Image: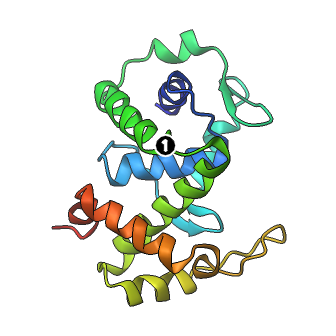
Amino acid sequence: MVAFILSQAEKNEIQLAEMTLAKYLYLLQTIYKIQLNLKFKGWHLGPYAPEIKRIINNRTYFKWDKSAIKILNQDKLTKYNFNYKEEIEESMNSLAGIFSRYSVKDRSWKTELLATLCRVIEEIQTLDFDFVRKSMQDWPIELNSSKFKNKAQKFSEDETKKCLAFIQKEGWDQILLNK
C-alpha cells in the first residue's frame, strides 16, 4: 500500500522523503480514514510511526534518492490487490491540491504544520488556541540540526491560527474531535 501511495505522490509531482511520507500517511489514516494500521507518535518533525522505517528500508521494493523514496519492482508490488485504491487516489489528489499551492521549499514546512496541528487536536480533543499552543510547547524537537526546542517555537501563533482555521473550514475538526 505504501508503494501505491508513493506512486500516487509521484503522479501528483510530489516528492516524498521519509518524514514527509510519514506526515502524508498520518493524514491519510487520520483524516481520510485509510486503513493503514500505523501507530503514530509525536516525533521531532511531526507525527511518525516507527514501522515506516522498516517498510521503506526494504531494499527489494524501495530505494532512497536524495530527495525522495523511489519504488523498485513496481510491477511486483502493484500485482497485489488491496482495498482502498480509489480512496487513496482521491485522498492523495486532495492532499496534492492542498500542498501544491505552496512552493516546493515551503511545502515541507506546511505539511509538518498541518500534520502537527491535526495530531495535537486529536490528542487534546479541543481547538482552544491556548491549549493548542501549550501542547505545541510541550512537543519537543530534540534534533541537533534544529534551532527550535519545541513546536510552538517552530510555528508562529499566526501560522497556527491560519492552520486551525483551515482545519475547521475543511471540517477536519469534526474528525479529529471524534464527533
Image location (x, y in percent) of residue 65: 77, 31
- For image coordinates 41% across by 51% down, the residue present is 27
Image location (x, y in percent) of residue 33: 29, 47
- Which amino acid does the dot numbered 1 rest on? Arg
What number of labels is visible? 1
- For image coordinates 46% across by 30% down, the residue present is 1
Element carrying mark 1: loop
**Which part of the image, by quadrant, shows the C terminus?**
bottom left
Image location (x, y in percent) of residue 136: 52, 80
Q: Name the side, left or right, on which 90 lies relative to 53.
A: left
Q: Is 78 rendered above or below residue 68?
A: above
Q: Could you say which is closer to the camera, residue 1 or residue 23?
A: 23
Image location (x, y in percent) of residue 178: 21, 67
Q: Is 152 rendered above or below residue 4?
A: below
**Identity of the residue furthest to the right in this view:** 144
Give the residue at mark 1.
101
Q: Could you say which is closer to the camera, residue 79 or residue 158?
A: 158
